[in-house]
Amino acid sequence: MALSGRRQMPDSTRIIRGGGSGDGWGIALQDMLATSSNDTAAWMQQHTRLLKSDTNSLVGLLQLRCETCYIKLYRYKSSLQKMLFRLGRGRPVRSFDVARELLAKEVPVSGPLACLLVPEGILLLTEGMPDGRNLNDLWLEQPASDEFRQIMHGAGESVARLHQAGYAHGDCKWSNLLWTGRQCYLVDLDGAGVAAIASAKQARDLARFTLNAEELAIGAELYELFLESYLQGVGESRQVVIVRMMPILRVLRERHVAKYGERGQRLL
């Protein structure tokens, strides 16, 4: 029987994370979904400001409980993934759990709010940070601005805090770092997870960031500000970190040159 004042939700829709009385984000999102049809993608097109849409996912900004939230629909790609989603497992749930762990360790990430199972897959709701802009877009709009010295310092500090906490991001490109004017936040934690300090996984984060910096041709001065801030945070020498990173960076460079051609300016 449906609860009084609330529309009956389909059996395939339920709260996986964020439904407790302490926060209520999952309940608020479920109530909002209950006012619409079972087509979650269509609901997002109507109720969110879409930022990205492809075969496997939709991403948008949603106003919920008088706050701006970031919402992502993960569509299941196979019957096996559908079963895992229904069991409360899979990448979006891991992303939620990792974000919660990182917040507890004071790593700057977008706060996780809720995970909901829906007919097409899983909805992940996180803090929206409406004043945040990703580093890639900021550079393309205002390259070499005075603020970028502060941004590079903040980026190095945030990646160092992630690594010192014993984690790696998994896709540490510039579009996954948001600058709010005060701090760099790590977002899109789909590939994030536990990683040994000074491991190859952490070195890959640095290589991915460096490749992006090379392709955008930011120049050695700004890159060294990032690297100096990172080294200070992890307490390692420049030589040791670069030796560990270079084999991975070379592989990433080769892949990008094969796909896009030579771009930007090499920094190392």
Image: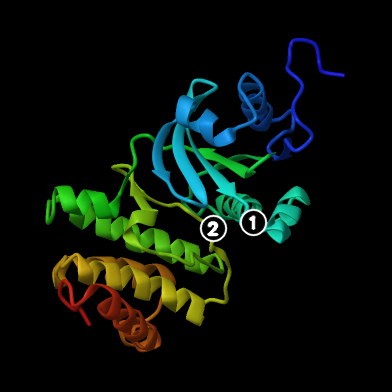
Query: What color scheme is it?
Result: rainbow
Which numbered tag is attached to residue 191? Answer: none
Residue 224 showing in the rendered view: no
Location of residue 252 (image quadrant) = bottom left
Write the residue at 15% across / 69% down.
Answer: 221
Please, is residue 11 above or below residue 31 in the view?
Answer: below
Please, is residue 238 above or below residue 18 in the view?
Answer: below
Write down the residue under mark 2.
Answer: 190
| Amino acid type of the residue that numbered disc 2 sits on in the rendered structure | Asp
| Amino acid type of the residue that numbered disc 1 sits on in the rendered structure | Arg
- Dot 2, crowdedness within 10 Å: few (<14), some or many (≥20)? some
Q: Nearer the viewer, residue 111 or 95?
A: 95
Location of residue 117 (image quadrant) = top right
Where residue 143 sits in the image (x, y, percent)? 13, 54
Residue 108 showing in the rendered view: yes
Where residue 182 sits in the image (x, y, percent)? 32, 44
Disc 1 secondary structure class = helix
Write the residue at 25% across / 79% down.
Answer: 257
Write down the residue under mark 1.
Answer: 94
